[in-house]
Image (cartoon, rainbow, N blue to C red):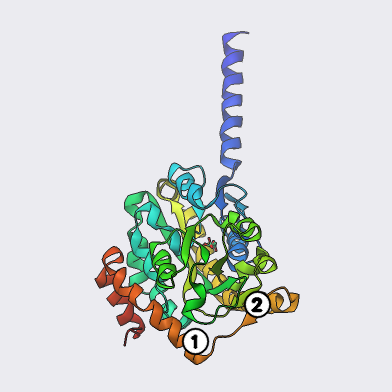
Amino acid sequence: MKPFVSLAAAVVFGIATLSAQAADPIVIKFSHVVAPDTPKGKAAEKFKELAEAKTNGAVKVEVYPNSTLYKDKEEMEALQMGAVHMLAPSLAKFGPLGVKEFEAFDLPYIFRGYEDLHKITKGEVGAGLLAKLEPKGVKGLAYWDNGFKVMSANKPLKMPEDYKGLKMRIQSSKVIEAQMRALSAIPQVMPFSETYQALQTGVVDGTENPPSNLYTQKMHEVQKHVSLTNHGYLGYAVIANKGFWDKLAPEVRTGLEEALKESTDFANQIAKEENDKALEAVKASGKSEIYTPTEDETKALQKALAPVHAEMSERIGKELIESIYAATGFDPSK
Ligand code: LMR
């Protein structure tokens, strides 16, 4: 080839490569562990739709639900390594990352309902917690609601004594571990994706989760009794790999931030309704007996679980726990 021709070819080829690069969307891999038909699953899909529209196609979001890409612990590691870009792990799963403070959300009966919860997730305390993720290479972006947990097993769960000796599957939180021990149950940390099978085969006897997770994983088919204890909260922090997030062009990041804001509002609007619907579906299935504890039974459970706050205060930070009580105006010990 003559030098002139090869130079021209190189220029043409170079331009073609550049324009192809400009047209290639930035791929965001968003991995999660629950079914698509849950508050988090639906919010992740909403985020995808909004993010792609608001960045005019500069971003493509690939959502991987149901642990298809990674299980609980692996997804955190994958995020830090940049193998995935976004996650929305439950607030109970930040201990292994070294940010134990998130376990405050797991304290039994710390919130009387969503209104108390939102004083934290939409306020200063919540923002302060997200900021603690930065030194870990993780950007905390938003909180997405799920709901209040029910207990399940193959025997009726009414009084604290009923939990004695039961092997209960839990998330990795030390607060939830202490909660189960306070009931003389035997906590077993296990990935969410393995829970159904563990319940089915009797590796564990029971578990806790909001109804939307119980129903969409079909746990109610292998748990004869569900008790509507609402003893604790389960929700999410939406997070990104910080290096990836910081390197995005400002206009792309703005589009993503808008998409996040809207998908957060969406998540928080649908969460309660999705859980109510799931509970109705569990009832309609007739596979589990649903029990609503009496006032006395609730009081007995609250009394048995109250010491967990003091027991965990060193791990989580007394000041943080007190700032939550102050923000919600509710101290469960009083
Ligand atoms: C669990 O492991 O039980 C939950 O954290 C699953 C989820 O993401 O809602």
> 255 or 232: nearer the eye?
232
* Picture quadrant of ligand 1: bottom right
> 252 or 123: nearer the eye?
123
Residue beneath the point at 74% across and 77% down: 286
Q: Residues within 10 Å of mark 2 (few under 14, many from 20)?
A: many
Which amino acid does the dot numbered 1 rest on? Glu
Residue beneath the point at 39% across and 67% down: 178
Looking at the image, is 7 positioned above or below residue 54?
above
Is residue 38 toward the left or the right of residue 114 in the image? Answer: right
Q: Residues within 10 Å of mark 1 (few under 14, many from 20)?
A: some
Of the numbered discs 1 and 2, the one sitting upstream in the chain is 2
Quickly name the residue at label 2: 279
Which amino acid does the dot numbered 2 rest on? Leu
Residue beneath the point at 60% across and 67% down: 213
Is residue 312 toward the left or the right of residue 80 in the image? Answer: left
Q: Position of residue 170 (x, y in %)?
A: 49, 62
Q: Is residue 37 visible?
A: no
Q: Position of residue 287 (x, y in %)?
A: 72, 73
Is residue 281 toward the left or the right of residue 313 in the image? Answer: right
